[in-house]
Amino acid sequence: MMTKNIKNKGFTLIELLAVIVILAVIALIAVPQILNILNRARKSAAEDTTNGIIKSAENYVTTFILKNNGSFPDGTLTFECTTDGCQLKETLDDSYNMDNLTTLDFKGTKPTSGTIIISNSGKNIIANNLNINGFTCIYDGEKSTCGDYKDRVVLSEDFDKKGIVGGYEGVKAIVYLDPTDLSKECNEENSDSTIGVKKGCMKWYAYNDEDGKYTMILDHNTTASTAWNSEATSRDNNEILGKLTNDTIENGWQESLNPRLISAEEIAKICKKTNFDANRPPSSWFYFEDLSQNQETGRGDICSKNGCKYAWLYDRTDYNCTEYGCLNNSNNNNIKDAKGYWTITPVLGYYYNTAWRVSINGSLNELSVHYTTYAPGIRPVITVRKSDLLQ
């Protein structure tokens, strides 16, 4: 009887390894693409939800006006958004019919946090930091934008989570950005707070949050000192404005950021000094902190990092001052060497040619506009759309 040899056929080990390698390469190429597609879908859904909430806010304004005979509050209405929906925070007086007008009615995914702000008698509607599908979503009155702040923006509600010490009273957010290129990667690790640095990744304090924009002041002086005007016979601030332009626009800052100096009135508002009058020195000058005066140094008492609410306004006001608040730095006991930085506000109607400056000792006071020996420096303020900070 003849037997027939049957040879078993299959893949060799080398062939199996080759197939596995090919599948791995395909996975390496395909998986990121699939994840990007899914991420874009989630982002698009978040933007659709944001648009739906804005549409709901517009309908809310119309319904409110119809129910209240054409009337709408002059002030700001704020809706706090959670997984339960967006709830009106303000309590309006009894003259308004508020039936079914305390929440926004919309479909879709509910934000886990964020606010909707209606102002200007219902004409302006802003979506502020809505957290939807893991994205931060903004509506600035023109368009909805969703993305991730990453490490370039730290919101005030996250200060504790980020281990940020100090009071930081009046700070809405800490922002890291390069004013010459807003798309540039920027965070605390690669930022530079050295006095004299005029571009690159830098640290900013946002003290105003309005209409989908942050108004922010730099955490250091771009120029250590400059005269407001070296001519004693003139009150013009041409020298200081020229230095500001040189430090900003001529160094490539985007003009849309509107670089400028802070005003004395803004400083007073931040520090809640309601009786401040820019035209009445020396009676209007004040320390930022509510501290007793130290007669030896001519400044407020030394305060701790946790106790200085407004130290962010006067740290890094001199080459020797690099800590959180100059009052914490033992190297700055000589008050006559204090520089600080100029505000844009002159003191009108006063005998001397004076202007307001932020001092190294944590105060707002007046200084001769032609004071050159220890003249204050330049600390720019910019305005940036929050949507431009999303990545």
Image: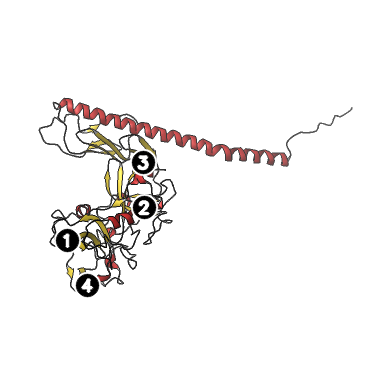
From what the image shows, is residue 329 above or below residue 312?
A: below
Q: Nearer the viewer, residue 377 or 169?
A: 377
C-alpha span from label 4 to label 2: 35 Å
Residue 250 visible? The answer is yes
Q: Local crowd at mark 1 within 10 Å, few (<14), some, or many (≥20)?
A: some
* Quadrant location of the N terminus in the rendered image: top right
C-alpha span from label 1 to label 4: 17 Å
The number of callouts visible is 4
Q: Nearer the viewer, residue 91 or 186?
A: 186
Residue corresponding to mark 3? 387
Of labels 2 and 3, the one closer to you: 2
Of callouts 3 and 4, which one flags the residue occurring earlier in the amino acid sequence?
A: 4
Q: Amino acid at mark 1?
A: Trp
x, y percentage for residue 260? 30, 51
Residue corresponding to mark 1? 285
- Tag shown at residue 248: 2
C-alpha span from label 2 to label 3: 22 Å
Q: Residue at x 54, y 38 (%)?
A: 31
Residue corresponding to mark 4? 297
Determine contact: label 1, label 4, CB under 8 Å. Answer: no
C-alpha span from label 3 to label 1: 37 Å
